[in-house]
Image: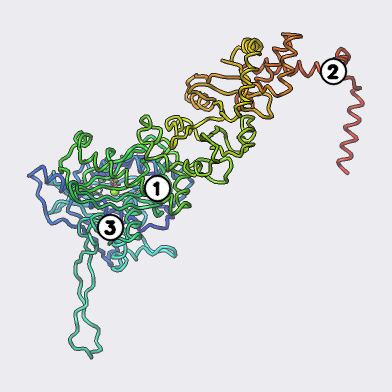
Amino acid sequence: MKETMEFKTETKKLLDMMINSIYTHKEIFLRELISNASDAIDKRHYLSLTNTNIPTTEYEIKVEANKDAKTLTISDNGIGMTKEELQEHLGTIAKSGSKEFLEKMSESKGDVDIIGQFGVGFYSAFMVAKKVTVLTKSVNSDKAYLFESEGLDSFTIEEAQKDDFGSEITLYLREDTEDEKYSSYLDEWEIKNLITKYSDYIRYPIKTWVTEYDTNDDKDSKKEPKSHLELKTINSMIPLWKKNKSEVTDEELNNFYKSKFMDYQDPITSIHVNVEGMLTYNALLFIPKKPFYDFYSDRNEKGLQLYTKGVFILDKCKELIPDYLRFVKGLVDSADLPLNISREMLQEDRAIKKIATNVEKKILSELQSMLKNDRDKYLEFYKDYGLNLKYGLYEDMGSKKDQLKDLILLNSFNEEKLITFNEYKEKMPEDQKAFYYIVAKDKQAAKALPQMDLLISKGYDVLILNDDVDEFMIQVLKDYDGKEFKSVNKDDLGLMDEKEAKKIDKLAKSKKNLLNQIKEDLGSVAEVRLSKKLVEAPACVSTEGEITFEMERVLKSQNHDVKATRILELNPNHNLFKVIEATYKENKEEAKKLVNIIYGNALLEEGVIPDNPKSFRDDISNLILNLNPNLKLDDEVVDVDAEEVEENTENEDKKEEK
Ligand code: ADP
Ligand code: MG
């Protein structure tokens, strides 16, 4: 009995997209169907290892064309599907990958180039076929079923006849059009070409019918040699990672990466690892040119594929890669793991831990050599993934800092490029004792900060931090090569010569009462001191302790109401300081307003809104009003004849018309 069932709404949408697709690489449908066949065999093989009821067999995948019927059939002797599985796996989209694909597709308004990045899988068949049938028999059932669909709203399932376990997917190809020769997929050469291009490393033989010419003994004969068809294995089958590193070309690695991880671009770099000895494993690691579409989503799961002795075990083994390297794609195949390893065992397994440590080391040393030998490439990498390295350095209380610190690049005040800590160090003048950094949006913003004056006058370079994590990272790092980090925004920079500094200390002592008075009047500062770092500016606000203005901002965006401890620094050599002092002697109320303005202004220079914007504004207004005490403010300022105004505007309108 034939049952008709409806596709789920989402599946309909996806099918609709496939059917109407103008994607130029429709040929990937074959890769998808072969990969499903290979997965199905993997599953059967894996089951047979633990379940003796399930027989093993000579595994194979066949691709067969029928030119008369214009059909292409991909068959496997894998696990097969029960009726329920047919309905569930082919009738609904369970995978988040396809769902995200749908979302992305509607966001990107049909940028078909992204199809390749998604495992749209089975449905891709409808890019080239007007009808698809699936004849399948599950190893867990003695009944076979036939699924049939034209990709529209519904599909049918009925009981059928099939001797062997496995599935047979038949595509009824569409009619050729001007732009698209669907019949080419029936061509022997094209089939061979697509198999080697996309599926060469599938571990099971992929067979297709190939024309073989009989050797002609009669050399002078003008007759065409006779030929016959033979079912031949097309793919090389040896997993690329098992080959010796020196035998594998970059191009092979790139092609492997693209077909395995469904990217349409070559990776930035590929790392091939063969290790033999106490621990034996092979690994292939790739850094995608661009972070994957789901990289920033919560659904993104990190992990490398895990194989043991060539048998696929797990798609995302998260134990193999640290969080901060989550962008790395790849696989590990080890001979030292049991086939039936469980997820719980993975966490404890010492071989896995050891491999993970090595994998991490390999990646970091590859990055280090990229930075050294191909800076442009590293910059391209760093643009997308640098932030991850910074987080890596900061994570776990900086346990990885020594491995990561030399991979970090930061903006420099003196140089027009990103520099490493080491490059900063090498350019330091002999008398420079510390690393200086400033938190600022960019060089322009940094330059505008009064605290920079002394550093600029000395010619010292300053690292400009502009990522949220930067300052946290520096705090974890503490020092570089024995040189302390000093924040221009917060620390006493220790740049003033000793004599001058002593003078200021002495002066500060004698002005102690005044400074205390100012502190009391401002209320929200922890201290008012005489500055040792200002040159031209009258004042600046610095912070004390771990929390800086930048962190205050970052934490606030995460809903933490933590305030930086504010210190008002006054420039004792500035005339304003004398004015403040004099005003305090004459009129305490006026003086209070004055320091409030100076403080508010210094905050603004740091990009921080004054604590009480209204009183800040009132004080400034008051100051301006007092500029000209003789002005008679009681007179009406606006005293214009209304008619006159009208006339004037009319005249102006006329002028404009001309
Ligand atoms: P994916 O392979 O990423 O899971 P597909 O759309 O390619 O997504 O396939 C959907 C599901 O259909 C598979 O997960 C599998 O359960 C089932 N399936 C597809 N092809 C086969 C096959 N040849 N043999 C057994 N199951 C299959
Ligand atoms: Mg698939």
Kindly give the residue lying farthest to the bottom in the view shown.
220
Amino acid type at image mark 3:
Lys
Pointer 2 residue: 628
Looking at the image, residue 601 sits to the left or right of residue 462; the answer is right
| Color theme of the render | rainbow
Numbered badge on residue 245: 3
Looking at the image, residue 315 sits to the left or right of residue 470; the answer is left
The reply to whether the residue tagged 3 has its Cβ within 8 angstroms of ligand 2 is no
Image vertical order of residue 360 relative to residue 538, above or below: below
Q: Earlier in the sequence, mark 1 or mark 3?
A: 3
Q: How many C-alpha atoms fall within 10 Å of the one at disc 1: few (<14), some, or many (≥20)?
A: some
Please state the horizontal and vertical placement of residue 346, each as a whole percent of the image.
21, 37
Residues tagged 2 and 1 counted as in contact (Cβ below 8 A)? no
Q: CA gap, disc 1 to disc 3?
A: 20 Å
Element type at mark 3: helix
Is residue 610 visible in the rendered image? The answer is no
Q: CA gap, disc 2 to disc 1?
A: 65 Å
Looking at the image, residue 354 sits to the left or right of residue 603; the answer is left
Please state the horizontal and vertical placement of residue 452, each as a whole percent of the image.
61, 33
Please state the horizontal and vertical placement of residue 265, each as a whole percent of the image.
41, 54
Q: Earlier in the sequence, mark 2 or mark 1?
A: 1
Q: Earlier in the sequence, mark 2 or mark 3?
A: 3
Residues tagged 1 and 3 counted as in contact (Cβ below 8 A)? no
Element type at mark 2: loop
Give the residue displayed 22% in from the left and 59% down from the top.
237
Amino acid type at image mark 2:
Asn
Amino acid type at image mark 1:
Gln
Looking at the image, residue 480 sits to the left or right of residue 206; the answer is right
Q: How many C-alpha atoms fall within 10 Å of the one at disc 3: few (<14), some, or many (≥20)?
A: some
Pointer 1 residue: 368
> The C terminus lies in which quarter of the figure?
top right
Image vertical order of residue 639 relative to residue 388, above or below: above
